[in-house]
Image: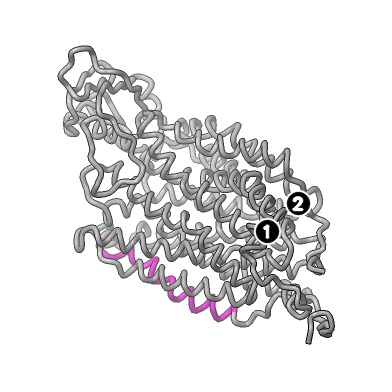
Amino acid sequence: MSTASRPIAHVQLASKSEERRVIFASSLGTVFEWYDFYLYAILAPFFAVLFFPKGNETAALLSAFAAYAAGFLVRPFGALVFGRIGDLVGRKYTFLVTIVIMGFSTFAVGLLPTFQTIGWLAPILLVSLRLVQGLALGGEYGGAATYVAEHAPQNQRGYDTSWIQTTATLGLFLALLVIYLCRFSGWMAPGDFTDWGWRLPFLVSLVLLIFSVYIRLKLNESPVFQRMKAEGKGSKAPLRDSFLKYPNNKYVLLALLGATAGQGVVWYTGQFYALFFLSITLKLDGATTYMLIALAVLIGTPFFVVFGALSDKIGRLKIILAGCLIAALTYFPLFKALTHYVNPALETFQAANPISVAAKDCQFHIFVGPWSKFSDCDKAKDFLTKSGLSFTSTDLPAGSTDNVITKIGNTELRGADEAKYAAALKAAGYPAGADKSKINYPMTLLILFIMMIYVTMVYGPIAAFLVEMFPTRIRYTSMSLPYHIGNGWFGGMLPLLATALVAASGDIYYGLWYPIIVALVTVVIGFIFLRDNMERDIESDWK
């Protein structure tokens, strides 16, 4: 029977009770998937010791961040693979597959041997599993957001999809909580966590996987998708229709550069980069760092829903762009304020002891591996960077036979002997760690909360905004790719690139230029070329 003569099946839209069940089940499953993905992100500095060779700590950290970034780099490919399946077969089936892949790959990380046991095969296996995780996550988010949006009434798509937006942050909170309980609650010795306890958060994911699959199996397919399929109007080639046909390919590019790129860097700066800055640069102990970030996340999470609901009234785009702009204008003072309120002794030491490094053969390292060679300059800068200290780079004096000359206050050091550097810093009064009795907790939490508000502004309305940009027949594919490039590439690369920029420049705040520039580019492109599509009728937009 031809499509023209085929009788059109009538599919009822979701009832209120089903709508609530869809939001709950989709959000809960997605929380667990983000939990799986972010376990590694939180433990990246810890994994630098376990899965990469010792010797240059900044290099090992860059290697850990490179493995962290690998999972993000592959997410757009997952969006292509699973987005196509989602537009051809259905939303429910696709995100059932993705959550199974994610759960098993996360469970496998908990079984991996370390570098000490199998050498370079350890990071290779770790990166391989991160790639599998990234592929799965590339298919998860678009499916969950599309599924919820296609159940939502037109006048509250922002509100309904904002619950999906809370899942990434709640997954981060859950990962922080589980790691905190394993590492800092006292029932496990620090040595036990290093030996075997770090595996527990990953192994727990198997239980979460079983629970998530059970819940999602009870869901029905999206009524909008069902009706479109019943009318025979689905796309037969979602990839071609999404990326090779005008004007949809133009909208995909604009969604990336004018919305998701800036949203991605703001999200990762306000949560992950803030976490790494506290623990690595400001030398705050892990337990206190996790507690502060977790509290900021917990207090800030309801604002995803607040801004999602607000977007139903005033529009999505203006909230997203306002969040990007305010973040870009305030990141430098906010992070400098973190230094002041978290480790004032480090701030005082830096002001009293200017540091300079005169050297040759300095390299800019991003992706570190067995091919990497580290000069005396690299080693000297590595020591200062991992100490959370800023320094200026200068040329060696004419005729100097040294590879590197470092000045710490009035002390001059030649070469890259780490023991001499440590002794010079100690003699000058360097604070090896943040003094918890000197931390201004209310102000620190306020700063972290402000950055969380930026996160909720850019992320709360983004799902509804992307859903409304693309037609039902190619929605899953079209919205997933710009989302995962913006978050996976622009956002996920942030810790790696920012750390490399700090090490190369000698300025502990220099890495912030990356999210600031990306956010400002998004503001300009979004303001000029994008408009809201709040009135789009996604219940019949294939006709």
**Residue type at mark 1?**
Ser
Q: Up-down: is 246 above or below 231?
A: above
Q: Secondary structure at mark 1?
A: helix
Q: Up-down: is 346 above or below 275?
A: above
**In x, y percent, where is residue 491?**
52, 48
- Which residue position is annotated with label 2? 311
Number of marks present in the image shown:
2
- The foreground one among 93 and 195 is 93
Quarter occupied by the N terminus: bottom right
From the viewer's perspective, is 224 left or right of 497? right
Report how far apart the C-alphas of labels 1 and 2 lie in the structure.
10 Å
**Residue type at mark 2?**
Ser
- The foreground one among 357 and 433 is 357
Q: Is residue 58 visible?
A: yes
Q: Report the span colored magenta.
A: 195-216
- The foreground one among 83 and 4 is 4
From the viewer's perspective, is 96 left or right of 509? right
The image quadrant of residue 154 is bottom right
Residue drawn at the location 68% of the way across and 73% of the way down: 22
Q: Are marks 1 and 2 in contact (CB under 8 Å)?
A: yes
209 inside magenta stretch? yes
Q: Secondary structure at mark 2?
A: helix
- Which residue position is annotated with label 1? 162
Q: Up-down: is 7 above or below 412?
A: below
